Image (tube, grey):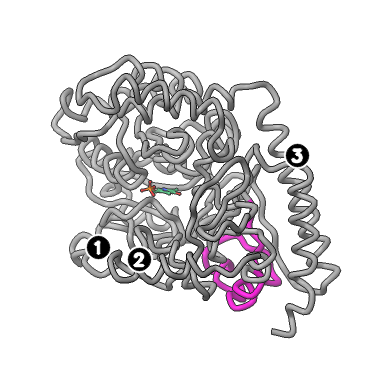
Amino acid sequence: MTPRDRSREIWRRALEVLVGGVNSPVRAFRAVGGEPIIVERASGGRIWDADGNEYLDYISSWGAMILGHAHPAVTSALREQAERGSSYGVTNELEVQLAEQIRGALPSMERVRFVSSGSEAAMSALRAARGFTGRELVVKFQGGYHGHADSFLSEAGSGLATFGIAASAGVPESFAALTLNAPYNNPAAVKEIFAKRGKEIAAIFVEPVAANMGVVPPEPGFLQMLRDVTAEHGSLLVFDEVITGFRIAWGGAQNAVGIPPDLTVLGKIIGGGMPVAAYGGRADVMKMVAPEGPVYQAGTLSGNPLAMRAGLSTLAELRRPGFYEELDARAKRLAEGLTAAAKDAGVPVAINRAGSLLTVFFTEGRVRDYASAKHSNTERFATFFRRMFERGILLPPSQFEALFLSAAHTDADIARTIATARESFSGLTAN
Ligand SMILES: *Cc1c(COP(=O)(O)O)cnc(C)c1O
């Protein structure tokens, strides 16, 4: 590893001009200490910093780069589209094609609306749910993340979990009061909320596999219970599949569990690395959205043709037979290897995995909700992160984020990651 002089110099300049040096909080690496990586380029499963150091990248742009960086098919689609224009502001067939692909994969999404970020999609889905039901309350789960709209910022996962922000400043008390939090995987708590306030609840928002408090899979029956309780009370069930969409399975987690939500939120993978997200679902609900209905939502760059092309070329690769089976098999090997390495080093960990999403929690017990995730020894995680980083392996810089495997991670990469983890676990309990 060469000294990170140039990276350090860029970081110093970043701190002078960008808020906290970044454009999204976790990138500041504050939970793990040290100076963050400054990226120069990326290809396949690898990323290079401004000093030319190479890292195996398990951030994968937070899951968006499921094919790896600069995939040739996506790159050539983008190049070709750039010559035809990068934004039209009027409708183009590519938007129809990507929506058709998505509906084909996720039949519950009878109507689709593209937007530019997952936050925007979740915020808009909630507005549509409120418009349709005429109700104001939303139920979400502790440690769940649905972007940064006002309604979702209490007891949220992702960066808020990382920085210990229980509720964001700047959200009016009167908005925050409309959001009810329940513990994930706790049917009794959800039933109690519905018993008390069921008639006021517009929707439940849930990550069908929680991945923003680290990975926490749903326990058997939990999602079905949410389906039943919302149907019973005339509330909508919204699956936030921004991470799980086209990752857990072709389509998303709803296909894997066989439970159709009323609305779905997508992002990350469907843009193939470009800023795209979508919300959609039941035609009668989506009819509420302008220009068909009175719920207003719009976007200058929505359905952007470059982004649509990146999404279409990504989905074409994901459709290949065996894609998810292969990725899953490799992730399973990684999880098994990490489990054995931690055990041999005497480091207590709980490794949760759902398909190609994985988190090594530095804790003894099982992790099944936000409270148990928070039992993790974050100091130990930080030391482990730094040891891996110094050895050229870039993990997500927070205990409360998933590690994202991509199709560009080879068997040799997995073996190297396990061997490096073995070194990094060694002596860790002394810290
Ligand atoms: C990333 C994420 C979002 C927000 O998407 P952005 O594009 O970052 O705004 C929403 N929900 C989930 C589950 C996410 O992981």
The location of residue 349, given as percent across then percent down, is 72, 67
Identity of the residue drawn at 30% across and 58% down: 179
Q: Quadrant of the N terminus?
A: bottom right
Mark 2 secondary-structure assignment:
helix
What residue would you read off at disc 2? Answer: 14
Amino acid at dot 3:
Ala
**Frontmost residue, 402 versus 292:** 402
**Frontmost residue, 107 versus 242:** 242
What residue would you read off at disc 1? Answer: 177
Ligand 1 is within 8 Å of the C-beta of the residue at disc 3: no
Amino acid at dot 1:
Ala
The residues tagged by marks 3 and 2 sit, at their Cα atoms, a distance apart of 40 Å
The residues tagged by marks 3 and 1 sit, at their Cα atoms, a distance apart of 44 Å
The location of residue 309, given as percent across then percent down, is 41, 24
- Furthest toward the top, the residue is 93
> Disc 3, disc 2: CB below 8 Å?
no
Name the quadrant containing residue 326: top right
**Frontmost residue, 169 versus 389:** 389
Q: Quadrant of the C terminus?
A: bottom right
Q: Is residue 232 above or below residue 47?
A: above
What residue would you read off at disc 3? Answer: 329
Identity of the residue drawn at 54% across and 60% down: 51
Which span is picked out in magenta? 358-384
